[in-house]
Image (cartoon, grey):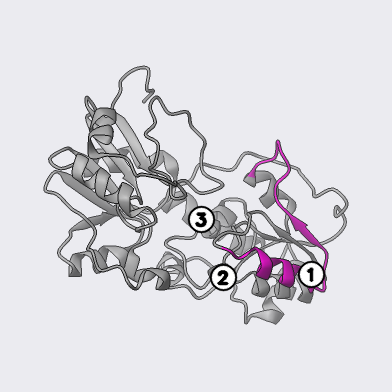
Amino acid sequence: MSVEARKWAWALGELGFDAIRYVADDTVPGLGIDATGTPPARQEVERAVDGCDLVVVENLLSLPLNPGALRAVAAALRGRRALVRHHDLPWQRPQFAHWTEPPPTDPAWTHVTINELSRAQLRARGIEATTLYNRFAPPVPSTYRLPGHEHERVVLQPTRALPRKDVAGAVRIAAQLDATYWLLGPAEDGYGPELDRILANARTPVVRGLTAGLTVDDAYAACDLVAFPSTWEGFGNPAIESALARRPLVIGPYPVAGELRAFGFRWLTPADTDAIRRTVDDPDGVRPDLDHNHAIATEHFALADLPAELVRLL
């Protein structure tokens, strides 16, 4: 639904580096996770959402990345219809072990989690939620090849660089395959010096970032293997993106990976070194598994099915 047709929702919260870009009709300074200075007053948020039929809050009421904004938004939304979407929760992140405030709630709000683990944990704390897994559009067809590495194997890590992403593990996978290692996202949370050290000691060629004009779909098209050895993810979009792109995936042991694997995906783990090599040595032999993963991703995680699910939810 276009904002020109009806002002029906106003989204608050954080977006990842690879999120869909959009232009806001209205902005409230101080809501960002990296905002400095005085957080917005409740009245500022109320002004922005007045007249909206539904307010969608993306993770802002979940993690205390900006506590002042969290409290202002929660206060402004009391009694207003809101869909509060939780990516991660404070007790799931070691850096928020000190945070004792429960996630705010209100009878007018509908809580949504992106995994069953978080739904159960919220319920144990007295908050009922519904799980709606992340949804994905089909990838745009691409024949892109990484310049200068067209005839080499390419291992793609389509994530930011943080300790929990296990960049070192992904680099080891690339080195074992004599492949180029390609990291799409930037370092965050002070991880830059450690990332520089890991990449400087890599025993394989390294490529960083996504050239302007390219998309994540181009990156998947250019790789032979996706490395995603994370130890924690609220969901883990590469798990589904790789399936839709028909690329083999090496996935880490994070808890929600097991929840997604239960749909029937056929994935590799970092310990499957022989199987990883066979996969890249014989791409035709692994094609049935890639077709199988594609079918599961299309059946259970299609963006086209989301409107009907939201209608049922709301």
Going by the numbered disc 3, the residue's amino acid type is Asn
Tell me the quarter of the image containing the C terminus: top left
Is 237 left, or right, of 100 in this rendering? right
Name the residue tied to disc 3.
237
Q: CA–CA distance between discs 1 and 2?
A: 17 Å
Front position in the image: 74 or 105: 74
Q: What residue appears at the point 69 percent right and 49 percent down from the top-left corner? A: 219
Query: Which numbered mark, 1 or 3, is in the foreground of this view?
Result: 1
Q: Tell me where residue 251 appears, x and y as whole percent.
A: 56, 70
Q: Is residue 192 magenta?
A: yes
- Which segment is the magenta one? 190-215
Residue for badge 2: 163
Does residue 314 appear anywhere in the picture? Answer: no
* Cα gap from disc 2 to disc 3, whole angstroms: 18 Å
According to the image, label 1 marks what residue? 200
- Distance between the Cα atoms at labels 1 and 3? 27 Å
Residue found 52% across the figure and 35% down from its top: 21
The answer to whether residue 311 is above or below residue 172 is: above
Q: Check disc 3 and report its element: helix, strand or loop.
A: helix
Rendering coords of residue 294 (x, y %): 54, 54
Amino acid type for the residue under numbered disc 1: Ala
- Taking the magenta stretch, the answer to whether it contains residue 173 is no
Mark 1 or mark 2, earlier in chain: 2
